[in-house]
Image: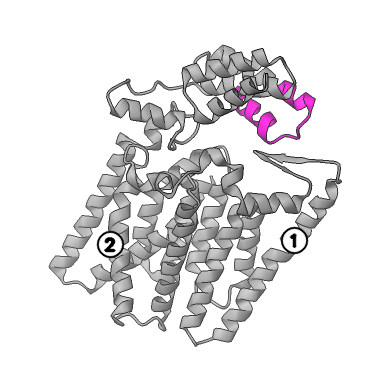
Amino acid sequence: ILGIATLPLAYFATRNRFGQPTALLFLAIVALSDIVIFTNARSEFAESLILPMIVLNLCWLGRHDIAWRRGTTWLVILMTSFGKGFFVIGLIGLTELVITACRKRKRPQRVVALVTSTALAAIPTFAYLTWTNTHFNNDCLIHHEATEAKTVWHLAYEITFNYAQIKQHVTGTYRDALIVFTDYQVWPVSVTLTLPALLLTLTLALKLIANKLSPRSRIGSITTGLLVWVVVGSAIVLGRGTLGARFHLMYLPALWLLAALALSGLIRRSTVSVKTLLQSLAVTLSILMVAGLLAAGPLKWAPFSRFEPMPESEEYKAIQAYRAGENPYPKSHGRTLYIDLANYFLTTAPLNREHMEKALKYARLESQRAPDDPRAWAYVGEALLRLGAPKSEVRDAWEMSLKLAPNKRLTNRLNALDQTD
C-alpha cells in the first residue's frame, strides 16, 4: 500500500514544485526502479515508509514555510529506522544548509525553519530513547545481530556508526557496494538508468560551473543542494561498503530528481527536432527499463532467493554459476513462515531459552520441509549452539548447510567451534 501510494505522491508533489514534465519523468523513474520494487515487496516496512518521506522533502527543498510538516516527516523517519534515519535527515539538513548559503532571500526564515524542524524531530526521539533506556536495567543485555549493549544509547550508537562491524555479512568493499550499478542480472533497471542519469546531472553541474545557472536562483540553489546530497550520500554508502540495495535510496531519489530536472529543461529549451529526439530517447530508455525488469532483476531471482543477491552470498554465487554455464538457473523455493520465525527468535527476540527452543523448533520444521535449504540447517546449528547442545550436533547441522551452499562466515564459525574441542 505504501509503495503504491508513493507513486501519486511523487507525481503531485513534484508537479506542484517543479512542473508537470519533471514530475512525469521523476514518476517514471520511481515507478520502474527495481530497488523500489524490491524494497516494497519485502516484509519490512521501513524503506516503504521512508521513501515517500524523502520524496516530500525533495519537493520542500528551499522552502521556509514547511517547518512543522518537514519536522513531522523527520520524526517519522527517525522512529521508523533510527540509524538510517540519522543519515537521511543529515543529508536533507546538509542540502538545506547549502541552499540557505546560496540564497540570501529569506535566509533568516529558512534558518529558523530548519532549527524548528530539527527540534520537532529530535526532542520526541530523545525523550523516547530516554524512556526506553530506563526500561532496561544494568543487568540486562540487549542483543541485536552481533552486538550486545547494556544501554539503548550504546545500541543506537553501534547501529548508527558501527554498522560494518555489526552487519559484517552485508558489508564489504566499495566495489562490492557498486553491484547495484554494475550487475545487470541482479539490478537491470539501475544499471540501465545510471549512466544516463549521471550524464544528465553532469549537464546541470556544468551549467553551474559556467555560470549559466546561477546558484543564487531558486532552481540553481536547489540543484547545488541536490548535487551535494548525491555526492555525500553516495560517498557514505559506498565508503562503508554497504551491500543492501535499499541503502542507496538514501541518495538515489535526489539523483533521479536531478536527472528529471535536467531532461525536462533540455526538452523545454530545444528546437522541435531536438525535442522530438530527446522525447524518443526518454521513451526508449523507459522501454529498456521495463524489458530489464521482465528479463532479469528481482522478478527473476526473488522466487529462489532468501535475501537479495550480494557478493559472497549463496544467492549471488548461484547466479554466477548460471552465468558461467556451470548450473541451470536456480529453482524457485516455496517460502513458509518457519524460516522467518526461526530468524526472528534468533536475531530479534530477547535472548532466553524459551525463544531459542522456538527458533530450533521452526528451523527444524523448515529443514524437514525443505532439506536442501542451507539457511534452515544453519539456523538449526545456531539454535543448538545457544541451547548448549553437544557440539557434534551443531557441527552436523552446519556441515549440512555448508554442503548445500558454501559460506565463508559459517565456515569460519565451524572452524572456531572445532578449535574449542
Query: Residue 360 in the image: x percent, y percent?
Result: 68, 20
Q: CA distance from mark 1 to mark 2?
A: 42 Å
Colour convention: one colour
Q: Residues within 10 Å of mark 1 (few under 14, many from 20)?
A: few
Q: Residue at x 54, y 86 (%)?
A: 106
Q: Which one is in front, 225 or 256?
A: 225
Q: Tell me the SS state at disc 1.
A: helix
Where is mark 2, residue-wise? 199
Q: Could you say which quadrant of the image residue 409 lies in?
A: top right
Q: Please give the range of residues in magenta.
A: 336-358
Asked whether, in this view, residue 366 is left or right of residue 349, the answer is left
> Three-letter amino acid code at disc 1?
Phe
Please say if the residues under marks 1 and 2 sit with CB atoms less than 8 Å apart.
Answer: no
Which residue occupies 38% across, 44% down? Answer: 179
Q: Is residue 372 left or right of residue 341?
A: left
Query: Is 358 or 374 nearer to us in this picture?
Result: 374
Q: Residue 53 in the image: x percent, y percent?
A: 55, 58
Picture layout, residue 323 above or below residue 235: above
